Amino acid sequence: MTDRKTSSLALASLFLLSTAILFPATASATSEKQTLRFNVSPNGYPPYLIVENRAPSGIMWDVMSLIADRLGYELIAEKIPRKRVDQMLLEGYIDATPRAREWTDEPDKFLFTDPVVAIEEVFFFPKNSELTYRTPEDLFSKTIVTHLGYIYPTLEPHFESGRIRRFDVARDRDMFFYVLHGNRFAAAVADRLVGKWFLRNEGLRDHFRTSGESISTFGFRIMLRKDWQDFADQFNRELTRIRENGELEAILANYR
């Protein structure tokens, strides 16, 4: 009886040992997450990206963090200046960045997910200004404060001809201070939610008004390299799921 027990224990031990030898890579792979280096930019883009605190936050970060975790990725924040983002993405130094296709010089070089949220660009005028916006002609001979590196399709022909002048700044908060304190600036162009977020947090809501007409509405997406198609497909499926089950709306509600 003792010999049979000893033999059975030996066989069980041998089986466990052989399993560990044959399948170590599989066990390790399932327990380790892949990394995804996600650009949040040095100054962020509140409320879509907020980098003032120790840990990043904001709408795009929260959505990406939720989905990346479910897809088995560890999300790592990288603060890359706007002018270097596209090249660093192509060269593999980062893996993804939030971006609208319309803001990209050569969008065909990249892969874009489905829109996470809609961006609506409007003009922010000083409260005491009589200037209004219905068509670009209303801005002829004016200087508009714009975001460095951003493309504004509706206004680009007029920027190029000089009929409307643009003044680029890197930080969103500076756009409003230039308009507020600089006599030569007629308005700032920014996403409606971004502008309202800043003005509310800075106590400046009573100093500005927004145009009734927007100059563009388009999707804010995740921009990837072309070899990330599998991730983009999985991301889109999960994005649809959180949109339908209310998780996306809960994230948006935190920043309104």
Image: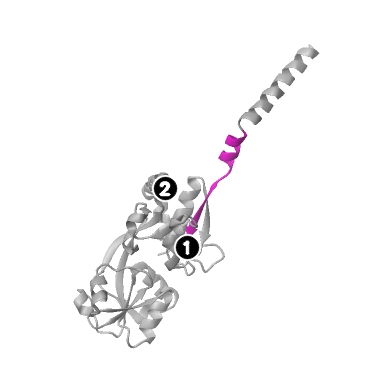
Check disc 1 and report the residue beneath it: 40
Check disc 2 and report the residue beneath it: 227
Instruction: Please give the name of the residue rendered at 41% of the width and 61% of the height, measured from the top-left corner.
Output: 86
- Helix, strand or loop status at disc 1: loop
Asked if the residues shown at circle 1 and circle 2 are in contact, with their CB atoms under 8 angstroms apart, the answer is no
Q: Which residues are magenta?
A: 24-40
User: The disc labelled 1 sits on which kind of residue?
Assistant: Val
Q: Position of residue 180 (x, y in %)?
A: 37, 84
Instruction: Please give the name of the residue rendered at 39% of the width and 50% of the height, measured from the top-left corner.
Output: 226
Q: CA distance from mark 1 to mark 2?
A: 21 Å
Give the quarter of the image for residue 147: bottom left
Q: Position of residue 152 (x, y in %)?
A: 29, 69
Give the quarter of the image for residue 165: bottom left
- Foreground tag (1 vs 2): 2
Instruction: Please give the name of the residue rendered at 21% of the width and 75% of the height, measured from the top-left corner.
Output: 136
Q: Position of residue 238 (x, y in %)?
A: 41, 46
For the N terminus, the image quarter is top right
Q: Residues within 10 Å of mark 2 (few under 14, many from 20)?
A: few
Q: Is residue 231 on the magenta stretch? A: no
- Which mark sits nearer the N-terminus, 1 or 2? 1
Say whether residue 93 is left or right of residue 205.
Answer: right
